[in-house]
Amino acid sequence: MNAPVSAVTTEQQNPRTRALDAMSVTELLTAMNDEDRRVPVAVAAAIPQIARAVDLAVSALGAGGRLIYLGAGTSGRLGVLDAAECPPTFGTDPGQVRGLLAGGRAAMFEAVENAEDSVAFAVADLQAIELTAADVVVGIAASGRTPYVISGLDHAREIGAATVALAANADAEISRHADVAIEVDNGPEVLTGSTRLKAGTSQKLVLNMISTAAMVHLGKVYGNLMVDVRPTNEKLVDRAARIVQAATGCDRSRAESALAEADGHAKTAIVSILCGIDADAARERLADAHGFVRTAVSVPSPASTDQR
C-alpha cells in the first residue's frame, strides 16, 4: 500500500522555511543555500547503491547494451540532459545513452498534462526504442511513486533488462520495482513540494556520478582527461589540443600535428605521442587495449622515443 502523498518527504513543509515569504532576499537565499548544503551529504549516504548502478551500466554498455533514463517532469528532463551530454563528452554514439521523458520531446519545454500518470506511455516509449535484455533502465522519480516510471521499470524487468530506481524519498515505491534502489532523502524542500530544488539537485548529482563513473570504467578517460571528447566546435578543438598536451607534456604544435594525423581523436594522438608510433599503429594499440589509454601505453614499443 502506497503512503499518502502528504507522508512523502518531498511534499512535507520545511520547518526552517515556514516564513519564506517574510524573508529578505538575502535571508531567503541564505536559507536556500543552507538547505542545498544538505544534498551532497544525503547523496554520500547512497554511494553503495550508486556504485551498484554503475556496475550495471558498465556491464550493459560494455556488452553493447544501452543506458536508458526514464522519468517525468524535472526528473525526466534531468535524464535527457545527462544523456545528451554523453556524446560530446565521451564520444559515445547518441543511441548508447538515452533519455525518455513522459510526454515526449514536447514535455522537455512545456508540461504535458497527465503524462506522468500514464502506465501505457512508458511501455510504448520503451518499445519504440526496442528495449532488450542487454540494456539497463534507470527510472527517476523524485516522489518515488510516479506511475510512468513504475510501469517502465516493470516492463524492463519483464524484458530481462537490468533496472535501477532513483528517488528523493526513503522507502520509495519505485524501489520495489528495480534491481537496485537509490534513495536520496534530502528532507523537505525550501518551497513545499517543489522538487526542482533539492530533489532535482540530488538527482543531477547522482546521474552525473552514474554516467561519469561508467565512462571512466569503459576507458573513456585517461587520468582525469576526457580523451574521447568530440572536437565538434572551436572550443572543443582547443580543448582536445590541451588534453593531448596535458597527457603527454608535448607543446601545442606537436599536439595539433598529432591530432591532425589522428583525425581529431585525442586518445589516438596521445597514444601516438607517448609510444612514438603513427596514428594507425596507435589505433591498433587502442583496439588491443579495448580503448584504455593506460593499457595501450603500458607496453613498450620498439620504436618508442621521447618526442615530448
Image (spheres, rainbow, N blue to C red):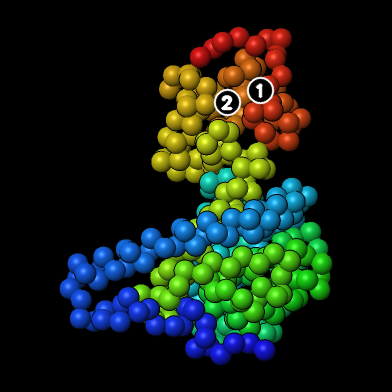
Q: Nearer the viewer, mark 2 or mark 1?
A: 1
Contact, CB < 8 Å: mark 2 with mark 1?
Answer: yes
Specify whether 4 is left or right of 16. Answer: right
Which residue type does callout 2 highlight? Ile
Along the viewing direction, whichever of 175 and 248 lies nearer the viewer: 175
In the rendering, at what x and y percent does residue 46 appear? 58, 60
Residue in view at x 69 percent, y 80 percent: 151
The label shown at residue 297 is 1
Is the residue 163 above or below the residue 14 in the image? above
User: Viewer-proximal residue, 88 or 171?
Assistant: 171
- The percent position of residue 117, horizontal first and vertical second, equals 60, 86
Residue 39: which quarter of the image? bottom left
- Measured as percent of width and height from the top left, residue 59 is found at 75, 51
Left or right: residue 126 compared with residue 208 = right
Residue 155 vs 85, above or below: the answer is: below
Residue drawn at x 69%, y 26% as measured from the top left: 296
**Is the residue marked by circle 2 packed among few (<14), some (14-19), or many (20+) residues within 10 Å?**
many
Sort mark 1 into few (<14), some (14-19) or many (20+) by Cα contacts within 10 Å. Answer: some
Secondary structure beneath dot 2 equals helix
**In the image shown, does 67 or 124 lie closer to the viewer?**
67
Q: Give the position of the N terminus as an image quadrant.
A: bottom right
User: Distance between the Cα atoms at labels 2 and 1?
Assistant: 9 Å
Q: Which residue is mark 2?
A: 270
> Which badge, 2 or 1, comes first in the chain's sequence?
2
User: Residue at left 52%, top 86%?
Assistant: 7
Q: Residue at x 55, y 59 (%)?
A: 45
Kind of residue sitting beneath label 1: Val
